[in-house]
Amino acid sequence: MAESALLLVAKIGNQLRRQTRPNKDSVVKSLREATAAFAEIEQPSGSNKKDATRKLEAAIEPLKETIVKGLLRHRDKDVRLLVAICATEIMRLMSPEPPFEDKDLRDVFKLLVSVFAELGDTANSLFSRRAKIVEIVAKLKCCVIMLDIEFVYVLKFLSLPSS
């Protein structure tokens, strides 16, 4: 596991948590740095998996808390996409255990579905990031978790129009 990437994620989470009214540019910059750091972090494995998992949880906790307590409902499109990337990366790293409580998972999934709604715009420069989110969600079988927590929003979104 990349120690420097873990430290960076913890630092970014702590910085964002301390800001009472962060401006969009600073949030976007911080979240971009976090997404780059997450790309360097792998799931803990090996003989010291338990200790490595605790260390990972401690490092991502400040960012996870910041996401849940405010960034999930941010109105800016770029911020929402970066938050979705961070949330899916957190889910990837902590799998198979869900890192968010059920009530927070609903909000995370609602955000993810809103990101999926923009997948039709393949010419958009952020398309590859959205596709990466879909890849992680599919790999983690999040649809099963959505059904398990009775995430009705997705069922309405995915329902086909009746003929």
Image (cartoon, rainbow, N blue to C red):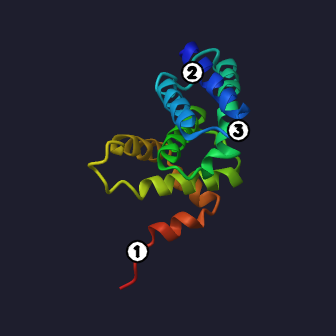
74 left or right, relative to 159: right
Residue at 49% x, 57% y is 113
Q: Amino acid at mark 2?
A: Ser
99 left or right, relative to 41: right
Q: Nearer the viewer, mark 1 or mark 2?
A: 1
Q: Position of residue 68 (x, y in %)?
A: 67, 45
- On the image, numbered disc 2 is attached to which residue? 45
From this view, report whether residue 74 is shown above or below residue 90.
below
Q: Position of residue 148 (x, y in %)?
A: 62, 58
Q: Quadrant of the C terminus?
A: bottom left
Q: Residues within 10 Å of mark 3 (few under 14, many from 20)?
A: some
Looking at the rendered structure, the secondary structure element under dot 2 is: loop
Q: Nearer the viewer, residue 97 or 85?
A: 85
Q: Nearer the viewer, mark 3 or mark 1?
A: 3
Residue at 61% x, 34% y is 94
The answer to which of marks 3 and 1 sits earlier in the sequence is 3
From this view, report whether residue 26 is shown above or below residue 155.
above
Q: Amino acid at mark 3?
A: Glu
Residue at 57% x, 36% y is 27
Q: Which mark is residue 117?
A: none
Q: Quadrant of the N terminus?
A: top right
Q: Which mark is residue 65?
A: 3
107 left or right, relative to 38: right
Q: Nearer the viewer, residue 30 or 137?
A: 30
Taking the view exactly as shown, the residue that stands out farthest to the left is: 123
Q: Which mark is residue 160?
A: 1
Q: Nearer the viewer, mark 2 or mark 3?
A: 3
Q: In 3D space, how far apart are the residues under numbered discs 1 and 2 (Cα atoms)?
A: 41 Å
Q: Position of residue 136 (x, y in %)?
A: 45, 41
Quarter where residue 60 is shown: top right
